[in-house]
Image (cartoon, helix red, strand yellow):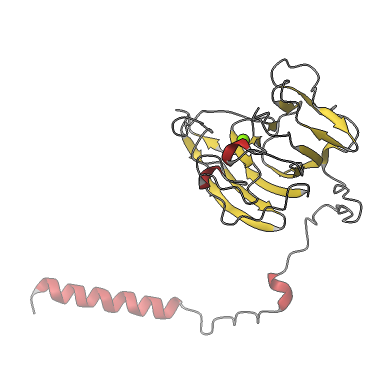
Amino acid sequence: MNKFITLSVFSLFAVATATAQDAPKEYPKPERMRPGMSEYWTPQPKVVTPGNIATNSAPSDAIVLFDGKNLDAWKSSRTGEAAEWDVHDGVFTVNKTKGDIQTKDNFDSFQLHIEWMVPENITGKSQGRGNSGIFLQGMYEVQVLDCYDNETYVNGMTGSIYKQKAPMANVMRKPGEWNVYDIIYNSPVFNEDGTYKVHPKVTVIQNGCVIVNDYEIQGTTEYIGFPRVVKHGDGPIILQSHGDPSEPISFRNIWLRPL
Ligand code: MG
C-alpha cells in the first residue's frame, strides 16, 4: 500500500468516526400527517352572487356591457362618438352603415358572456351569412357566423379564432334561436423587442360546449396574410359590422368579469 492510499483510508475512517460521534442517538420521529396539515383556510375567495338562469342576469361582480336598455358602455370605432347600432326589444342589432362598435373601457384578462342571434330569415352562404365577430383586446377575432347548415372554411367557422384555429365542434342553434358564447381570455406578456413572452390564450364555450380549448393565439387577425405579433396593452371588446348582404345579427345580455 503506498503512502497516498494509506492516508486516504485513514482520512475516510476519521470522517466516519467523527460523523458517528456527532449524530444524535435517536432522530425525532416525523409527526404523523393529519388531514388539516394539507388544508389552508385563508384568504377566502370573495363572495359572488351568481346570475339567475331564469332571468339571464349577470353575476354580482360582473361589468354589465349591455343590459337590454342602451349602448352607454359602447362607442363607435369609426368616430369615437356614441355607438349607433339599433337598440330594440331588449337587444341590439348591427347597423351595417355605422361600422364597428367597441367598449369605452379597455380590459386585461377576462371572462366574457355574450349572446347573439342570426335572424330567422337569414340569407347568403359561407362567410356572407350572419358574419360578425368579437375582437378580444381589439386584436383577436372570435368569429360570429351562421354555420347552421352553412359550410365555409373551417378556420373561419363560428367560434373559430379567425384564420387561426378551427372550432372542435359545430354547435350552432338554428337561425332565430339565441347562441351563447362564454369566452375566457388571458392577455399576452411581451418581451421588450415586442415578441410574445407569453402568448394570449383563449377558451370559447358555445351553448355550453367547449369548442376552443386554451388556444395559444398566434397574433393579430388578418383577412389576407398571416397573424402578426403587435405589442399592445389593455384593449376594448370590438363588435364587427361585417357588411355582408344578409340580414344583420342581434346581441343581448353581455357582461364581463376581469380575471
Ligand atoms: Mg367576422
Q: In which quarter of the image is ligand 1?
A: top right
Q: Is residue 53 above or below residue 175?
A: below
Q: In which quarter of the image is the N terminus?
A: bottom left
Q: Which residue is drawn at 76% across and 43% down?
A: 117
Asked whether, in this view, residue 219 is left or right of residue 121, the answer is: left
Q: Is residue 211 above or below residue 4?
A: above
Quarter-of-image position of residue 243: top right
Front-lying residue, 169 or 81? 169
Front-lying residue, 101 or 177? 177
Quarter-of-image position of residue 35: bottom right
Q: Residue at x 80, y 57 (%)?
A: 44
Q: In this view, does 150 lie above or below 233?
A: below
Q: Quadrant of the C terminus?
A: top right
Front-lying residue, 179 or 185? 179
Asked whether, in this view, residue 176 is left or right of residue 11, the answer is: right
Q: Residue at x 64, y 33 (%)?
A: 137
Please state the horizontal and vertical placement of residue 65, each as a whole percent of the image.
Answer: 81, 35
Please state the horizontal and vertical placement of residue 112, each as a whole percent of the image.
Answer: 73, 44
Q: Residue at x 53, y 28 (%)?
A: 231
Please state the horizontal and vertical placement of residue 52, each as a whole percent of the image.
Answer: 89, 54
Across the whole image, how many numbered discs are drawn on residues? 0
Front-lying residue, 219 or 169? 169
Please state the horizontal and vertical placement of residue 66, each as a whole percent of the image.
Answer: 84, 36
